[in-house]
Amino acid sequence: MLVFLLFGALVTAVLSESPPVLKQVSQGWNACSLVVCAPAEKGIPGRDGRDGIQGLKGEKGDQGLQGPRGILGPPGKMGPAGPKGSQGNDGSKGDIGEMGPRGIRGLQGPPGNVGPSGAKGGSGPQGEKGVKGEIGLKGAPGPQGPKGNIGAPGPAGAKGSVGEKGAKGDVGTKGLQGPAGPQGPVGKPGSPGSKGDKGSIGDKGTKGDSGLSEVNLLKSKVSALEGQLKALQANFAKYQKVATFPGGRTVGNKVFKTNGYEGNFEDLKQKCVQAGGQLATPRNAAENDAVQKVAALYNKSAFLGITDLKTKGTFKYLNDQPITYSNWLQGEPNNNQGNENCVEIFTNGKWNDRACGEKRLLLCEF
């Protein structure tokens, strides 16, 4: 009986260590069927196997397959620092590396200090004489010149405002009786007076002149006075227009005036005509000097009333008469570029031919 129990325990232990496939094969059999090869009979229950003797230790089985990698555990605490190692020897110098790419251009540096002046160069050869240039822009005013001589009296100033009424003066001595004035117009007939007494008959007088001759003489005097009045009115109107120009010079019976306006030749000619005059036309040195002084006062060149528009190459006055006086600059007139048909006067009094479309100072004569 004991042998049987030991054998059963051994089989049980072997079955428990066998692979799962063997367990599935042996599920339909018991221990007895392996020994007697016949169906087991139902016996009494066996004793608890816990009091049996431990069987022999089986052989070490083959290593199983590697299980899946476990989850990474938390990091451990940092260990203490190790001792500082000694400094190693210097390594050998490495080979020179390849040149790197070109860097970005840097910002512009501050300007350098001004270098010393170079030595003065020698004079170059004289160039060819250039063509006559245009008159340049107005230069800056020069220093004040010395005091000039006292000039001729200027034109009469504008009429001043009426002053306050003065105190009544003493009665002056009676002057000499003036000549009789012209006879006034015939008055209206008065109302008839009362009839007077008949006078005595007087002596027979001498035969008088015909009354018709006195009437004709009176008419001729009235006509002459009317002509003088019209001439005075025309002169007064002319001088009123001249007074509108602020600066000018007087030479003899001529007055040269300007108001500072600038324009081309045709524009200036029209403006002088509208003012009752014409473009300045000096016919002698004194008149040219007066025109020069007005131009110098404004520091501008002025057009004169002289052109060769109708007769190319022959300058004439505006009334088509040939000029009797001139003060040309040396080398002028030269008709530069073939279109200089008008005449300008510089601030030094010299003349120059100039294109009529240029703008110059307005200078009229009256």
Image (cartoon, helix red, strand yellow):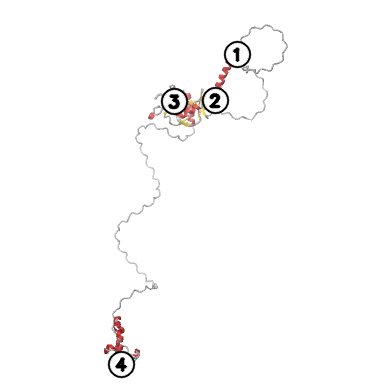
Marks 3 and 1: in contact by CB < 8 Å?
A: no
Q: Is residue 270 visible?
A: yes
Secondary structure type for disc 2: helix
Q: Name which quarter of the figure residue 118 lies in.
A: top left
- Cβ atoms under marks 4 and 1 closer than 8 Å: no
Eye-nearest disc, 3 or 2: 2
Contact? badges 3 and 4 (CB < 8 Å) = no
Residue 293 is at least partly visible in this image: no
Q: Amino acid at mark 3?
A: Ile
Mark 3, Cα crowd under 10 Å, few <14 / some 14-19 / many 20+, is many
C-alpha gap between disc 3 and disc 2:
26 Å
Give the quarter of the figure containing the N terminus: bottom left
Q: CA distance from mark 3 to mark 4?
A: 170 Å
Residue 366: % across, % down: 50, 25
Q: Earlier in the sequence, mark 1 or mark 3?
A: 1
Taking the spot 58% from the left edge, 15% from the top edge, the residue there is 219
Which of marks 1 and 2 precedes in the sequence?
1
Dot in front, 3 or 4: 4
- Image x and y of residue 299, in percent: 47, 32
Q: Which residue is mark 2?
A: 237
Q: Nearer the viewer, mark 1 or mark 3?
A: 1
Residue with the mark numbered 4: 2
Above or below for 15 versus 88: below
For marks 3 and 4, the one nearer the N-term is 4
Read off the residue under disc 1: 215
Front-most of residues 207 and 196? 196
Per the rendering, the mark at residue 306 is: 3
